[in-house]
Amino acid sequence: MKRIINTLAKVAIFTLFCSHAAHAETTEKKFKIAKIDNYQLASMLENDRLKSLIVSFEQHNNLCIENLVNGEFALAKPDCNLAIKNIESMPLHDQHYKYLKALAYSNRAIVNYFMNEMTLAQADFTKAKRLKNNSVIRHNRAYFYSLANREAEQQETIAMLAD
């Protein structure tokens, strides 16, 4: 129970409705986890394989988050991996695709952090940043570096936030 409470104390969840812009406070001292709901693109596609990948991505991403919030990190990681695998299998390369992929990497980085796999967490945050350097990714990277006592990297991220 203490593990779940500690996890919840460090995690803030917001839901992305893909027809609306996502908003999240960046001043909180918590990770921000991106939950994908009602991904409307799936219903508009005629390509069944792509539709299936999108639905599977959403399901695995949300299971990853559910297990993360419950402190079940070993259960969360395979779903995070499958969410990333599904989105990487999609023949899409637009900005929205990169945004979803970056959020999936950020979610897995958070799981890696809680599993004390700091090198993997840092690598996933770096991949997320390269894909789409949005406010959620910047916030999570800065918070990770503050928790991991990586002063130089944190200062770099804070400088980017100022831009």
Image: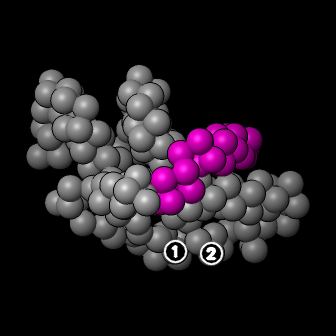
Question: Is 134 situated above or below 157?
Answer: below
Q: Residue at x 66, y 42 (%)?
A: 78
User: Viewer-proximal residue, 99 or 145?
Assistant: 145
User: Viewer-proximal residue, 1 or 154?
Assistant: 1
Queried whether the magenta region covers residue 122, the answer comes back as no
Q: Secondary structure at mark 2?
A: loop
Dot 1: few (<14), some (14–19), or many (≥20) neighbours within 10 Å?
some
Say which quarter of the image contains residue 25: bottom left
Dot 2: few (<14), some (14–19), or many (≥20) neighbours within 10 Å?
some
What residue would you read off at disc 2?
A: 38
Name the residue type under label 1.
Phe
User: Viewer-proximal residue, 125 or 118?
Assistant: 118
Q: Position of residue 123 (x, y in %)?
A: 43, 27
Q: Residue at x 44, y 28 (%)?
A: 117
Question: Is 108 situated above or below 13?
Answer: above
Q: Residue at x 19, y 29 (%)?
A: 149
Q: Are marks 1 and 2 in contact (CB under 8 Å)?
A: yes
The circle on residue 114 is none
- Left or right: 52 with respect to 18? right
Q: Position of residue 146 (x, y in %)?
A: 19, 38
Say which quarter of the image contains residue 84: top right
Most common SS among magenta residues: helix
Queried whether the magenta region covers residue 79, the answer comes back as yes
Residue interval drawn in magenta: 67-96
What residue would you read off at disc 1?
A: 17
Which quadrant of the figure contains the N terminus? bottom left
User: Viewer-proximal residue, 75 or 61?
Assistant: 75
Name the residue type under label 2.
Asn
- Left or right: 36 with respect to 47? left
